[in-house]
Amino acid sequence: MRRPFSVLLMLALVLVANGTAAIVAVPAGDWEIPRRQMVAAIREDVIATRAYIGRKTLRDEVLAAMERVPRHAFVPQEVMAAAYENRPLPIGHGQTISQPYIVALMTDLLEIQPGDAVLEVGTGSGYQAAILADIGASVRTIEIIPELFREAQARFKQLGYVRVQSRQGDGYYGWPEAAPFDGIIVTAAADHVPPPLVRQLKNGGRMVIPVGHRFGVQFLLLITKSLEGNVQTRQILPVRFVPLTGEH
Amino acid sequence: MSASAHEPEASPPLLGMALLAAAVLAYELLLMRLFAIVHWHHFAFMMISIALLGYGTSGTLLAMTGRFSAGRLRVVFAFGAIGFSLTSVLCFAAAQRLPFNALAFLWSPRQWGYLAGIYVLLLIPFLLAAIGLGAMLHHYDRRISRVYAADLAGAGAGAGLTVGVLFHLPPQTSLCIVAACAVAAVAAASWHWRKIDGRTAIALLAALGLVVVSGMKVAPRSRAAVNPYKPLAQTLRVPGARIIYEGHHPMGWFTVVANPEVPFRHAPGLSLNSDAPLPDQMAFFVDGQAMTVIDRFNAQPRTADYLKQCTPSVGLVLRPNARRVLVAGAGGGQDILRARAFGAQSVEAVDAHPLYARLLKGRLQAFSGFDRMQGAVRYHSTTVRAYLQSAAGVFDLIQLPMAGGSEMATFGENALWTVEGLAQLWGHLENDGLIVAPLWTRLPPRGGLKAFVTAWRMLEGQGVSQPKEHLAVIRNWRTAVVLVGRSPLRPREKQAVRRFCRQWAFDLVYLSDLHPEEANRYSVLARPMFAEGTRELAGEKRGEFIARYKYELSPPTDDRPFFDHYFRWKSSPEIASLRHSGGIALMDWGYPLLLATLIQAAALSLVLIGLPVWWQRRQHGTGVDESARRVTTLLYFTAIGGGFIFVEMVFIQRLSMFLHHPLMAAALALAGFLVGAGGGSIGADAALARGVSAPKLLPLALVAVIVIGWLAFAAMNALIHRFSGDALMLKLIVALALVLPLAVPMGMAFPLGIVTLTAKRSGLVPWAWGINGCATVLGAIAVPLLATQTGYAFIMKLALGFYAVGLVVILRFRGLNLN
């Protein structure tokens, strides 16, 4: 009589253990190698999607920043082991840190130069702002969730990102006193592009918005303002996929 | 082992059995609601399906521990029922604490661990209850028809009562009632057995007390445990956001959120060039998602200006000052305001969820400005198709709600977006009337193209010779709008569409005279995928294009009403290989996930069914006769378990098309089938008592299921048309008249099968009970998977095929003449 019960108990344990095995396997220590591997994965993704994203490779300074900025310092302890995997990670408060490939691509699409003024709406953990600052941009970043704002602010201070200024508040109206911006990055898409942000974009400037849910970006929306002030949008599928087959 | 051998339990405690069965079914329905709130609906479905394997597990345990449990029915039943009572609340509370996140499922291996944890936790209460119920069936195997009838009748009553309770109580509070019901089951059984003494009474009161205490701990937690990535949870993180109204209804948990500090800015399809301010808004959520808003309308002309600058307004641009507009799926009323902003004289707004109308006409009347619109706007709480069946007159314009855009909705049925649904709308248009159908778009295009081809197929079905002249499509970066004209669009109307797009920087996707260079101008894609797709779909080689497209674009029908189902097998290897290279959003993963669930459940079922056989062989060895009996039992109970659930699910779907009220259809079908089958089981008992032989009666019952099932299904399609416009009460009577005659012979199949196959071998009873449970679970998971591919008519054929297999198995078994 005891055997069947123990068999079932073992079955249950196997089921649970199967799922939890990945949780406890936490590597630690040297982050350089995983970071380089992460950048290598980004390079591979870029090569695979070059026909779609409109560039053969990402700019060296973007990849260099990805290789320098310590992503593990921007994620909670419990997911730190996965910090350099090419995937989004939860950071608490219902928010995520984006997939590194998407972060690199969005940064590249902004085409910013050292000294450019960049606005980020949705600081999150602060990783995207750190990448921008590492390239030499002067970054202003707004976060609406107070807890995330405080955590990111402390992180910027601790890691020495002096080029980043952050504030807590509603990003819909941008940062008018610092406008116009060479680049704007909105990390959480609404159902429309906030008109005040379009107005705060400098002529010749670029705005990037990822569209989709927090664990899956459907496409990137790139908004460009010509030197004459005309606005155009591009939708960029960040993956090599042709749904229309045959004679197209 | 039979009742006669163990006094005093000569007659079964039917009330106790029925109460426990009612509690279990109610628990299942409540968990479906609760997990739909906490997660997304198909995850709810998946979790509960697996957890129901508790039934299979109980059969296995009882089959393997027969000697122990046989002489201890009262203890085993009380253990099962009280155990269920306590764990139903506690295991739900524990499952809520696991941070399972459906959105991260494909990224994170630890999600599998959390999901497995939820399975195990939910399995416990079902297992305990099934042990109690199975022990009862096992013990009273000679009165099995009556016990089974009590089980079915109790489950049927549980289904009906749960829907009733959900009108008044939140599901998490209702859990306590379910738990108390299980305690009452023990009390009723003890009373029947005349075993209520002081000790039992104290034990029952203690159990009840524990249920109340644990319920009080659990009840307030359900809101806090909503998945943090669901829209409501995200909204509530914004400073200033607070829930100002919360209502429970069987159709969903309804919340209204206000935020005086950070305004909502819900404006689907708003132009990048917009210069209009957005008004104050309140947000409505159903089950923490499906956000719609209500605008503050203060009768100032500028209030609704922003709506004129959104893609969904293209129809009203063509029909300003419309005499009569129908706003389908009106929700919080944004489209009502849009119609009024364009000067619509009379607006009929329809939404199935009654709480929208109650709030707009009640406590939010001043905010919505509804009091100023009285006379011009009427809000109806019903489904759009039900409304149209009785609506008089025709409309200049029918504005549909936003559709598509969610990879979570694979198995969601959409009655509006079918060829027949669109045809019904089209039939209520003025001669120059328009249907305006906005959709969320995704890349690569899916919903927009499917909407286009569905409209095309509808127009063909209505005898329109040139569908291309009746259609127009525009888009911006997030939305698309399909326009369907009752008459061909006139040249000046096409020009008006072009002007509207030019003014607000929207892209033209389809007009019959569109030049390729007119498309893909504002929201530029690497290639004009939307325009290319619609052009192909409007061409001669439409079928070939649909066949080779990487997403499912076939037009949905009432038989296969899955508008948001885009999964195709042939594309899945390519998409799966891209999931970590920026391609995670390419996958509509509801389908593969449910398939994985089916495989998991099938593997578990095999183990559960195989264990007792292995155990039996190890203990006693098995003769040829015994093997044949086991194989027959396995095949027969798999067939009738699968057949029962298939029939039930087909009728739920068909009746929801007939009654146009999914919830009522589900309650009626569940209660009708379970109560009718209970009647059939009693009928079988009566026949056996009169000396009719079970092996002779059983094939007749199975033939009756096949014949009546076929007739009822054929008649249902005809009756849907015949009575579609009649009063609800008449339709309910017609629905019951279809269900009950079929349910009666279906209810005979299980008890007669038990008597025929397990005679003198009552050890087989719990095994058969477990097989039946496993088959039901597998069937419930398989139906949506199959229905998206084949439609429900095919499922019905399969169901009757299952019963035919059962018939063949029984006829062959009779021929074996086993001892």
Image (cartoon, coloured by chain):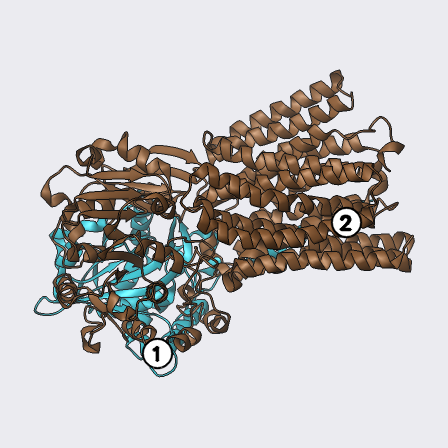
Chain colours: A cyan, B brown
Question: Are circles 2 and 1 on residues that touch, CB within 8 Å?
Answer: no
Q: Nearer the viewer, residue B781 or A77?
A: B781
Residue B674: x and y, percent? Answer: 63, 40
Q: Which of B400 and B96 is in front in this view?
A: B400
Neighbourhood count class around disc 1 (C-alpha, 10 Å): few under 14, some 14–19, many 20 upward = few
Q: Name the residue under label 2.
A: B698
Q: Label 2, label 1: how many angstroms apart (C-alpha)?
A: 54 Å
Q: Name the residue under label 1.
A: B540
Q: Nearer the viewer, residue B77 or A238?
A: B77
Residue B740: x and y, percent? Answer: 61, 42
Given the image, what chain letter belongs to the residue carrying mark 2?
A: B
Given the image, what chain letter belongs to the residue carrying mark 1?
A: B
Task: Please identify the quadrant where the N terminus of chain B is shown.
Answer: top right
Neighbourhood count class around disc 2 (C-alpha, 10 Å): few under 14, some 14–19, many 20 upward = many
User: Residue B86 vs residue B363: left or right?
Assistant: right
User: Residue B811 vs residue B303: left or right?
Assistant: right
